[in-house]
Image (cartoon, rainbow, N blue to C red):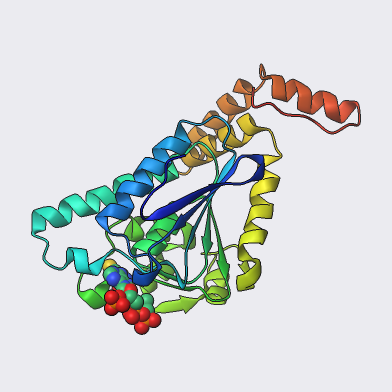
Amino acid sequence: MTTFENIVVEDHDNGVVLIKINRPDKLNALSPEVFVDLKAATEQIAARSDVRAVILTGEGRAFVAGADISAMVNFSMDEAKVYGQTGHDVMDAIAALPVPVIAALNGFTLGGGLELALACDLIYASEKAKIGLPEVGLAIIPGFGGTQRLGRLIGWQAAREMVFTGKTIDANEAKRLGLVLEVFAPESLIDSVLEIANTIASRGPLAIKTAKEVMTKGSELSLKEGNAVEVGGFAALWPSADRQEGMSAFVEKRAAVFTGK
Ligand code: COA
């Protein structure tokens, strides 16, 4: 795995990869360089067949405190458009990874930081997390998916309140809203999230991939169309060696050993 300037990519047991955004002196703000590193790391992970889950977190006091305001301050309108599109491309590439991506919010999760978390499949937080979309305070709007993904996750009214007020909420309030799944003590956040990732990694890899695929597709379809996608995914797993192994192991009362085939 390549070494990056702005992120750290670590291989953990059982095919779990942890990506840590590593600009703590700037609260991990998403500079153009961070986007380049995130995109490259995402492409490398997408090309690997041994990865079962990805965890995204931040070094220091922040997950990510937003897009890099210093980099944006003198942008022309055209440059702003390119930056917005770049952010979307990175978020989309993360969302499209064929394995579950878990955001572990260790601290400030603001603006582009929350948008990055929203591109993930599962979001967990430390008690220290502070979460919000403060862009209107800069007289701009969220530009990396915040106006679109947040409402789809927590409902449009709660999302409108967060976007219109730009307020920062704590982890427990985020849990109440369904924005984060669980809140952990800061010192146990990564271990807790690794445990969840390991549970996912212990299941049939093709089943996890297919589940993500059909749920992602279904979220943009009518129920009828989504159910048809599910039928296709359910049947497509039948010829897999892991499907045979999973069912045989159950019948033979032993633990299944999956190969991802
Ligand atoms: N872009 C660029 N730099 C940022 C940043 C951002 N989004 N967020 C923090 N930083 C930098 C600060 O400029 C500071 O750098 P410096 O030490 O060179 O001056 C450093 O990170 C530490 O931040 P600081 O503001 O001193 O920490 P704090 O604890 O006083 O405040 C926040 C923390 C998160 C409340 C505050 O940094 C903040 O409001 N950040 C911007 C959040 C935002 O509006 N995000 C949306 C952007 S579209």
Q: Residue furthest right?
A: 253
238 relative position to 65: left or right: right
Would you place residue 246 above or below residue 19 in this image? above
Residue for point 37% across, 55% down: 6
89 w.r.t. 76: above or below? above
Name the residue: 40% across, 37% down. Answer: 43
* 166 over 102 or under it: above or below: below
Give the number of marks: 0
Q: Nearer the viewer, residue 122 or 196?
A: 196
Residue 254 in the figure: left or right of residue 147: right
Q: Residue 14's x, y, as percent? A: 66, 41
**Image x and y of residue 194, in percent:** 64, 54
Q: Is residue 2 left or right of residue 51?
A: left
Q: Is residue 61 visible?
A: yes
Q: Quadrant of residue 11?
A: top right
* Residue 170: x %, y % from top left: 51, 77
Ligand 1 appears in which quadrant? bottom left
Q: Quadrant of the C terminus?
A: top right
Q: Nearer the viewer, residue 26 or 229?
A: 26
Q: Residue at x 84, y 33 (%)?
A: 255
Locate residue 162, reporting x and y percent.
38, 72
Residue at the image position 42 percent from the left and 46 percent from the top: 3
